[in-house]
Image (cartoon, helix red, strand yellow):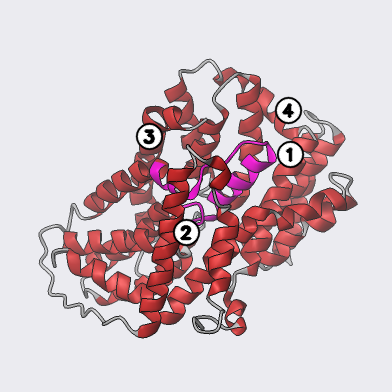
Amino acid sequence: MKKLLSAVVLGLALFGLGTLAFSLTQAKLLGIVGALVYLWSSEALPLGVVSLLPLILFPSFGVLSLKATAPNYAKSIIFLFIGGFLLAIAMQKTKLHEYIAARLMAIFPKSARGIIYALAITAATLSAFLSNTTVTIMLMPIALFLSEDIRLKVRYLIATAYGASIGGIFTPIGTPPNLILLGFLEDIHINPPPFLEWMFLTAPVVVLMILIVPWILSLSVKDLQITCKESIPALNREQKKLGIILLVLMLLLLANAIVKPFFPSLVLNEKILLLGFGLLLFIPGIDLLEWEDTRDLPYEIVFLFGAGFAIAAAFIKTGLASSLAHYLSSFAHLPLFALLFVIALFVSFSTEVTSNTALTSISLPVFYEFANKNGLPVEIILFTATIAASYAFMLPIATPPNAIIMSSRVIKIKEMAKIGFIVNLIGVAVVSSTAILLWRYFIG
C-alpha cells in the first residue's frame, strides 16, 4: 500500500510541477506517466495490471479517449512478437536451446577467459531470439556450477547477464524497446527496417560489445585454468523438426531482404510470416506445440507493449512531446556525433532506474519532435535512443538479467555498479560511433 501511495504522491507532484510549464492536459499526462513508471519500477502491482491502467486513466482524466487508447494494445507489430514467442516456447519445450548452448560452450578454451566468452556469447546468441530473462535463468545454474571460486562465480554470472542484454538488440524481437521503435515508426509513417536489415545494422554493436565486455570481465582472472567437461546431447526428432522450420524461416527472411530492393510487390509481410510460422507449430504432423503451451506466453509483456504505444501516442497528441522537444533545442547545434553520444548517454543512464520499455515509450516521441523541429536525421536519432535503452549494466533494476543474477546472492550491488559503469560508457561509445559511421548511410 505504501508503494501505491508513493505513486499517487509522485503523480500529483509531477502534475503540480507540470502546470508551471505545460498545459493542463499535458500536466495530467506527465503526472500519470510518472505514477506508472514508479509502479513499474517498484513492482507495487503486477506488471500486466500496471500496463492496463492507461486504458482507464487516460480517458478518465481527459488525456486520450478510450477509442484512441485501446487500438494501441492490438498493433500489428505485437503479433510479430507473439509469433516469435511461440517459436521460442517450442525451442524451450524441445530443449533445442540446450543443444545450441552446449555446442557454443564446446567451441571455447577451458580457461577462465574462455568460459567468460562462452557464457557471454551463448547468452547473446540465444537472447537474439529468446527472452533475455529466460536465457539468463537457464544459464545462471551453469554459471554457478562451473567454479567454486567466488571471483569466478561473479564474473561468470555477470558475463551471462551482460551477454543476454548485448544480444537482445540483434533482432527486432530480441528485446521490448526494439518492438516499441518498430510500432512508433509505423505510427509516424516511416517504413521500419526488415528483419535481416535490422540484424545488419546492429551486428557491429553486438560484435564489438561481445568482444570487449568479456575481455574486461576476464582481466583479473584470465590466467586461472579451469577443468570443465560439457557433453553435447544428440538431436532428437522434435529438435530436428524445429531446426528445419527455423532454417526455412531464416531462408524466407533472407529471400525477403534480397527481393525487396528489386521487386517490392513480392515482399512478404514479416509480421504475418512470423505469426504464421508460430501457428504452424500446432499443425497435425508437426505437433510441436499444443494450445496449453500458450499459457507460457508473456501476456503481461503484450500489455506492456500496448501501454508503451499508448503513452507514445498520448505524448504526441497532447503536444507534450513537442513541448519537451522545445527545451532540448539548445543541443541541436552540436555536431551529429556529439549529439548522438549525448542522447545515448542520457538514455543509457536514465534506464538504470526505470523500465527500458517505459523509457523508450516516453523518449521516442520527444526525440522525434526534437529531430523534426531542428532538421535532424529522425531515424538515426530514434534508432540510437532505442539501442541505448537496452544497454544499462549498473543496477539490478535496470534490466531483468541483472536482477536475476543478483538473486544468486553471490554478487554485491557495489561490484555490479562499478563494472557496469564502465560497460555503460563503452556501450554508449560503441552505439554512437556505429550510428555515425554506419547507420547514417543506411537508415533513412
Q: Residue at x 43, y 48 (%)?
A: 196
The location of residue 378, given as percent across then percent down, is 57, 29
Give the amino acid type for the residue marked by disc 2 in the picture. Pro
- Membership of 192 in magenta stretch: yes
How dense is the environment of label 2, judged by Cα within 10 Å: few (below 14), some, or many (20 and up)? Answer: many
Q: Name the residue tied to disc 4.
A: 323
Q: Which mark is residue 434?
A: 3
Q: Is residue 349 toward the left or the right of residue 427 in the image?
A: right
Considering the image in quadrants, where does the N terminus appear?
Answer: bottom right
Q: Residue at x 46, y 80 (%)?
A: 93
Mark 3 element type: helix
Give the amino acid type for the residue marked by disc 3 in the picture. Thr
Q: Residue at x 71, y 61 (%)?
A: 50
Q: Which residues are magenta?
A: 171-200
Magenta stretch: dominant SS? helix
Give the amino acid type for the residue marked by disc 1 in the picture. Phe
What whole-number distance in Å separates the C-alpha atoms at marks 3 and 4? 30 Å
Q: Which mark is residue 315?
A: 1
Task: Answer above or below: position of 284 versus 85.
Answer: below
Task: Answer above or below: position of 21 versus 122.
Answer: above
Mark 2 element type: loop
- Name the quadrant containing residue 21: top right
Q: Name the residue tied to disc 2.
A: 396
Q: Name the N-terminal-most of marks 4 and 2.
A: 4
